[in-house]
Image (cartoon, rainbow, N blue to C red):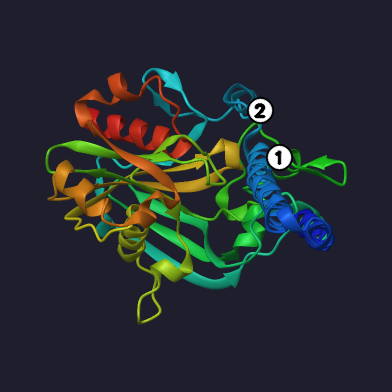
Amino acid sequence: MKKIYKYAALFALIFAAQIVVGWLLGVRLEENAFEIFTALILEPIVLFSVFNIYHNRFELFEEEKARLSISDEELKKTYNLEKLLSLWGKEIAIVPEFLPAQPLPIEKVSVQLNTKKFTLDPFLAIHLEEILRVNRKSFNSLTLRLDQIHSSPDDIKLDLSFSDYFSHLATNLSPEIQVGGVRLRSFLEPGPTLTPLAVSKTSNHLGLNVLLLTADQKLVIQERNDKVSSFANTLSPSSSGALNYSIAIEKDKTVSLQTALRNELSEELSAEIDVDEIFLLGLTRELKRLGKPELHFLAKTSLNSTELLAIVERNPKFQDEAQALRFIPYQRTREELQNQKLSPSLETNLALYELMAKH
């Protein structure tokens, strides 16, 4: 039984005891019976509510620690033979896997879905329950894994296969956990280079990141709140998620990147946003999450920043993951964001955006 349920059972016993005591006192002190009875009932409810809030915050902290407790400097030393991307003159812990000669129209990006399914290394399978206890995620789901790529300067084909979220939690999302006396990073990606995608032991759930450019030439940036399990309280792209089977599947059972991107953008912004053009800026691998592959896109909308904000703010669900939107003039990204706390996906999107702008 999870700790939170044990604590809930304990509070339920306290609550029952308080009711009995309240009734007995109420009988003996008839003048203040109602006040005594009410206070004794409300006290455990308030205490449990406060405890539950802090318990959830603690679990988020522990989960974040397991995923992100290594510094960029440590990562650079561990993978010192990898060529890294740079943002504003400083290297970031991101490895470029594919950089097009110029922004690549989404129509030039194709996918091939294979029916095979990723299987965990036997060592990880044995310790799966132990690894999952660190993470709050309690349900599994079907995900899409990047096996390998075939590319030229003008197009790219992605070979995908099936995986699942538990396998992702047990590999890419828990690199700093130790099980069986072994740190997962040392077991899966010890360095000094990343394992090629085709033979990687990690789930490599393919990430999707989109920077949205408005008609008045402003980049849409999200302020992530403290409720999310990854990169809380950071700035992130307009949309930052993953290529799940459920958001990418078409009626004919084929996988569509365009459909996935539009669905992910609508979900993250809690609104249907008209997108006129989508360009691939690059494919990268994130060192912090064991070489997790990430696609980075630039999308253009005919809406200006005022119109977009008005649409997004109509839906209160927007604040489930984000606190607010920022609209940054694309020429002023460095001045506006250099001293802010950025998620790795936003750092990468901006680095690729600036790299493509030079061309």
What amino acid does circle 1 point to?
Arg
Q: Which residue is tagged 2?
A: 78
Q: In this view of the protein, which residue sits in the foreground, 199 or 90?
A: 90
Whether residue 279 is situated above or below residue 129 in the rendered picture: above
Dots 2, 1 in contact, CB < 8 A: yes
Q: Secondary structure at mark 2?
A: helix
Q: In this view of the protein, which residue sits in the foreground, 254 or 198?
A: 254
Pick whichever of labels 2 and 1 is earlier in the sequence.
2
Where does residue 55 sit, x and y in percent of width and height? Answer: 69, 45
Say if residue 100 shows up in the picture: yes
Q: Quadrant of the N terminus?
A: bottom right
Residue 105: which disc? none
Residue, x 70% and y 47% (percent of image)? 47
Q: CA distance from mark 2 to mark 1?
A: 10 Å
What amino acid does circle 2 point to?
Thr
Q: In this view of the protein, which residue sits in the foreground, 89 or 326?
A: 326
Residue, x 67% and y 37% (percent of image)? 65
Residue 331 appears left or right of 22 = left
Whether residue 61 is situated above or below residue 280 in the rendered picture: above
Where does residue 79 sit, x and y in percent of width and height? Answer: 62, 30
Quarter location, residue 342: top left
Q: Secondary structure at mark 1?
A: helix
Q: Quadrant of the C terminus?
A: top left
Q: Which residue is tagged 1?
A: 185
